[in-house]
Image (tube, rainbow, N blue to C red):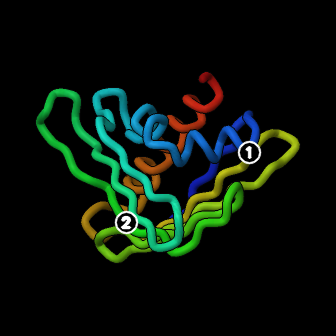
Amino acid sequence: MITIKATIKASIEKVWNFWNSPEHITKWAFASADWHSPKAENDLREGGKFSTTMAAKDGSMSFDFWGEYTLVKENEAIKYVMGDGRTAEITFTETADGVEIIESFDPETQNPEEMQRAGWQAILDNFKNYAENN
């Protein structure tokens, strides 16, 4: 698994809400400024499904990142299976410095692991920036 992390200077309730609410997901779920997430759906419960459309702003490319939740512990942890069968888990831990998010995921086989780590970290960094500034 590849693991990334960040500490968000915000309450656990705000972090959980911004991470899981579609109206917030569309504001941070992309890796670079030339991409965006025009659509997000989230049925946050075990067995529930999620989908986020990630698209180049120039319209040249888009894809849906989707999966199904296998574990949801409010303000603590999420596990899911992605559409291609890979798994991911996310923990949310309150610390003296804020909420530490640790995200681990199975790598795919088409891109180098370091590229995948950088892309997922960029999205997590976008989340940190959005949550701390809104």
For residue 56, above or below residue 89:
above
Three-letter amino acid code of the residue under disc 1? Ile
> Mark 2, residues whose alpha carbon is within 10 Å: few (<14), some, or many (≥20)?
many
Query: For this rendering, which residue is in front, 66 or 103?
Result: 66
> In what element is the residue under mark 2?
strand
> In what element is the residue under mark 1?
helix
Q: Is residue 62 left or right of residue 42?
A: left
Residue farthest toward the right in the current orientation of the protein: 96
Task: Pick whichever of labels 1 and 2 is earlier in the sequence.
Answer: 1
Q: Which image quarter: residue 99?
A: top right
Residue 34: % across, % down: 29, 28
Residue tagged 1: 12
> Mark 1, residues whose alpha carbon is within 10 Å: few (<14), some, or many (≥20)?
many
Numbered mark located on residue 31 in the image: none
Three-letter amino acid code of the residue under disc 2? Gly
For residue 52, above or below residue 98:
below
Numbered mark located on residue 67 in the image: 2
Residue farthest toward the left in the current orientation of the protein: 60
Residue 116: % across, % down: 39, 56
